[in-house]
Image: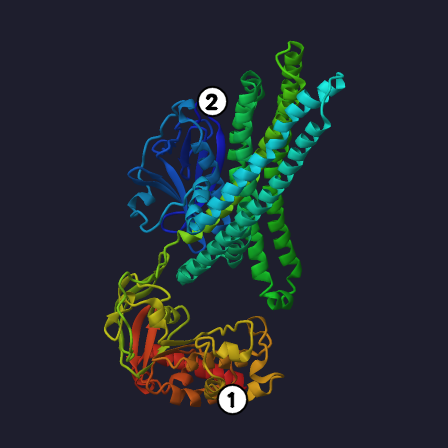
Amino acid sequence: MLAPGETVCAWFTADLTAEMRYSIRVAALTTQRIIGIEPGQNVDGGAAQNAGVTRRSWQLDPSLSLSILEGIGTGTLQLEGPSGWLYRWRFTSAQKEDAHRFLEQHQQLQTVDQSEFKPAPQGEQFDDDDALEEPVSGEDTTPGDRKSLYRLIRFASPRYKVILAGLFLAMASTAAGLVPPYLTMPLLDKVLIPYQNGESVHMSLAFWYLGGLAGAAVLAWLLGWARTWVLAWASERISADLRNQTYVHLHRLSLEFFGRKRTGDLISRVGTDTDRICYFLSVHLIDFASDLLMIVMTSIILISIDPWLALVTLGPLPLIAWLVHQVRQNLRGAFAGSSRAWGAMTSVLADTIPGIRVVKAFAQEHREVERFRVANEHILTANDRVNRTWSFFGPMVTLLTDFGLLIVWAFGVWGIFSERLTVGVLTAFVAYITRFYGRLDSMSRMMAAVQRAAASAHRLFEVLDEKPKAADPVNPVPLEKVTGRIELRGVKFRYGHRLVINDVNLAIEPGEMIGLVGQSGGGKSTLVNLVCRFYDVDEGVVLVDGIDIRRLAVADYRRHIGLVLQEPFLFYGTVAENIAYGRPHATREEVIAAARAARAHEFILRLPEGYDSLVGERGQLLSGGERQRISIARALLIDPKILILDEATSSVDTETEREIQLALENLTRGRTTIAIAHRLSTLRRADRLVVLENGKIAEIGSHDELLASSKLYLRLHQAQQDMAQTQAV
């Protein structure tokens, strides 16, 4: 299949079809094109030996772009052209790393001059399953690493005055640093050499030159200190703004985004990647600016002293520039892989440390240690790739600069013997050129930091470029008072390609209590998530007091919702702080009243510090029932008009459940309540029960009505009674 001179650079195996079925498809990236290979094709010789079976190929061209669209446990490698998408390779999370490496290799090839490539034969086009799909909307291709650093400028613009002051100080300190070599010329030619030759020279003249050298050194130090402090101050605040905006944006994103991202990877982006950018801005960028100014000013001085000698001195520059360009291409992909490897390792830690009880309970310490070892090996592999390139590049630049200095000495010796130069001029030239090549070497070594910071900026902007699926409207409808009427009209919702809620129509009156029942996976929790607007409906509408909730500001709407989750989550802090999480300024009396209502006051008083007792990481110092009662008190404290109870009593014993039910009878009065419970006995007092089956409403009625008319509810009720009898025995 390959043309003469065409070689394979990377390949990637996609293991899903458009219908999300397992099937192998191969994408091959060569020096000339991208080739798509379908199952059953013969690829052993290039000839189409299987009748009716063809392949796809696309010539590498700047108008073609590859991007990765990540889903929940799956992903898509998408090839796009000027008129839209051309092809998609779908894959599971097991192929994610290979897909990203394929994308990086393609990005590197795109920087190569395409005129160097010979035309490759194009395969015949054929229709496949993907051709029937609609283009993905709302997905933006991720900007390249090279653009990511430029995008940091908008974070720097609010402090442009400080940055300009820092650049002025950098220019002044650089200029002061160039004064000493210039003073060595008259010191040698007018003082030292004449005195050595027996001429009469005043000693005071030498002291003047020495004083000038000392003054220039002190001035350069003071200006350098001021420059470093001013630019470091600005860069720290730029990085802090970047962290803040990233964290704020994370809170704007919907649960769907967090469902397809690993916690450790997000922590790595906000923490490690922003730290790398901060270090780059506060250290390397300052050095780069100083080095650049030093090179420009030194070049001007060298040309003013002796243009021909300057021309010879600057001879190795084009070769060094070409070498820097070549190495930069390799480092960019290597650092991107290293950042992903660090994110994967952090994800292992984020999985294992919070779940350490489960790890120890199932004696899986060795397994988790092996997972960490494998993730750590991936970091080593990525860093070895960097080091292989860097170990060659650094010494090569040093060798070229040494040759440049040797050329200066050779040309200078010739100039002195031919009486074109003086010893003072040559000495000054050597001093300047030593600084010149020293700064040039420093700039070339800084390239690694630049590429590492670019990769980190790219990862951060991947998060910032995510569009919230449940975003605030441009002109939100003001929401001052809520009565609590909820209506769902023709609601449909999908997780990926799976239809979870299918044409649900339901009206809930203010103050009414609705119980959602059904088998696991029937759509109960998803329906509650749609009412809370954790997700937006795919079709239909959710109305509160007759207003589409998509027209309301998310924060304003959720202030009227009290939520008790199936798995209670407590933050590290005191009991009182966790109860008052929804109302941080609540008084201690209000906190205690909410705890009493949730039947939590008595056990809280038995804690060592009462309401000031620490609950531990995720509430690990409390029992499951205690955590659940605190989460109920937290929801009750905000006095919501809409109350969501998602298995609110699933983690408590029978006696505690009875106490909570007595409290909820009073607390749900006057509030619109949606309750989910597997124990049907907890929903007997609900005004209506809604039976869900496969995402549809199967039956609606009271407990007694459904027992008499619904076979599905009767079956659920009978199964619970049998289980209760078994447990009693």
Which of the pair 64/572 is nearer the observer? 572
Tell which residue pokes out farthest to the top in this image: 418
Q: Is residue 56 above or below residue 159?
A: above
**Distance of mark 2 from mark 1, alpha carbons?**
79 Å
**For the point 56% across and 85% down, which residue is it?**
604
Q: Is residue 313 above or below residue 492?
A: above
- The residue pinned by badge 1 equals 655
**For the point 72% across and 22% down, which residue is it?**
201
Three-letter amino acid code of the residue under disc 1? Glu
- The residue pinned by badge 2 equals 5
Q: Which mark is residue 631?
A: none
Coloring scheme of the render?
rainbow
Which of the pair 717/37 is nearer the observer? 37
Q: Which of the 4 image quadrants contains residue 216?
A: top right
Which x, y percent locates residue 184?
A: 66, 26
| Side (left or right) of 604 relative to 193 | left
Which x, y percent locates residue 497?
A: 35, 56
**Label 2 close to label 1 by CB (< 8 Å):** no
Which x, y percent locates residue 599?
A: 49, 87
